Each structure stands twice: as structure tokens, then as C-alpha cells.
Amino acid sequence: MTPDLSTPSRHKLPEDLFAMLIGTMLVALGIVFYSEVTLATGSTAGLALLLQYGTGISFGVLFFVINLPFYVLAVLRMGWLFALKTFICVLLVSYFTAAIPTWLDISGINPLFAAIVGGGMMGLGILSLFRHRASVGGINILALFLQDNFGIRAGIFQLCVDGVILFAAFFVLPFDRVVYSLVGAMVLNLIIALNHRPGRYVGFS
């Protein structure tokens, strides 16, 4: 029997929590891949990675601190529930990026593979969070706000912002790592741009 997709259905709390757990794990695993081969990405995660490479401060600490100002926009424009979910997701990503290297021993990884698969995992994780009215903070919050209120596609907007952050990576990383990072950014944002748009998914939280 074909399900009726014409009427949106509300996600239940267990569904939201499961999506947040799996989504943040995927994002964190992608970041760990990037960190292993010194790649960059966009949004606040990319900024945190660049600062980690330059200062030695852990990604989790930097990621949490950088996201703090964006909670104001989350509360004012997206509501307390969205802000709370996002706060939890940022905490989970910060935790998982520190914990995964103790759970998974990566002795070597090809940088192009890391860029494509890591970018894909981050894109799928962010997409999962978007569909359950959550995010990993920062530019994701602004991207969702612009899509919901002005019809600007979240993936396209984030691609533009990521371009600025990745341009800054030229001053921090070797040229080949920036090229690999650009490949990963394209994979990540294409996943969001192709799948997170009106009519593509009717569930809501």
C-alpha cells in the first residue's frame, strides 16, 4: 500500500532523539576523517578546524564556543525548541569528535577518500538534523532561517559561505589539502541542496 505523502506528519520525540544521535555521530565521524588528513570544511565546523590546526586547541572546545552567539538567532527566529535541539546537537558533536578517536583507530586514510566520504557523512548528518528541526549551529541556523523566511535554498547559501571559509584555508593549509576540501564541500552541500527543499520531505517536528 502506498503511503499518503500529501499530509505532513509530525515526528515523535523518540524519532527526533534518534535522528539527533545518528546525525551528530555522522557529522562527528566526518570531522574526524577531515582532522586525520588536515582538511577543512565550511560553516562553524570549518572555522573550528582551521583554528585547531593553528592553535592546537581541541575542535570540540572551539566548536562549542564559536556557536554560542548563534543561539540568540536560533531563539529569536526559530524558537526555543529548535535552539534547545541545536544546543544538544552541538554538545554531541563536540563530545563525539573527542570520543571517536578513542573508539576507532585510523592508521591511514587517503585524503581524497576522506574528503568525499567525510563530506558525505557530514551532509547526511546535517540533512537528518534539518528534517527534525535541529542543526549543528552556526551557519546552519542562518541557512535554515533564510530558507524558511525568504525562500533562499539552505544548501546554496551555505555553499557560498563555505567558499569564503575555504578560501581562508589557502592561508593555513597546503594547496592540495584545500583542493580536497573543496571536493568534500561540494559533496556535502549537494546532498543538502538536492534533498532539503520544499516538497521533497513532508515530515516535521
Image (cartoon, helix red, strand yellow):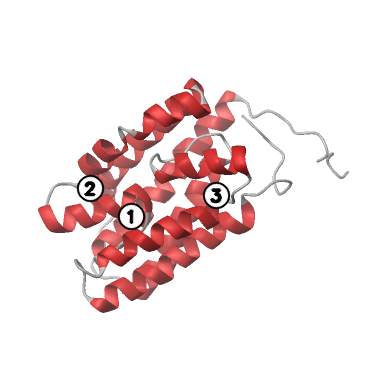
Q: Is residue 29 left or right of residue 74?
A: left
Q: Position of residue 133 (x, y in %)?
A: 55, 34
Which of the numbered marks, if any, corresponds to residue 31?
1
Q: Where is 121 relative to 76, above or below?
A: below
State the quadrant of the N terminus: top right
- Element at label 3: helix
| Residue at mark 3 | 154
- Residue at 24% x, 36% y is 65
Question: Which residue is more in the foreground, 125 or 62?
Answer: 62
Residue 86 as seen in the image, left or right of residue 1 = left
Q: Position of residue 193 (x, y in %)?
A: 58, 57
In the image, what residue occupies the spot 27% across and 43% down?
A: 63
What is the distance, in whole Å, between disc 3 and disc 2 at their CAs?
Answer: 24 Å
x and y percent of residue 139 in the render?
Answer: 41, 45
How far apart are the two marked residues, 1 and 2, measured between alpha carbons?
9 Å
At label 2, which amino acid type do we have? Answer: Phe
* Image-quadrant location for residue 118: bottom left
Question: Can residue 39 be seen here?
Answer: no
Q: Nearer the viewer, mark 3 or mark 2?
A: 3
Disc 1, disc 2: CB below 8 Å?
yes
| Residue type for callout 3 | Ala
Q: In the rendered structure, which disc, 3 or 2, sits on the residue that comes first in sequence?
A: 2
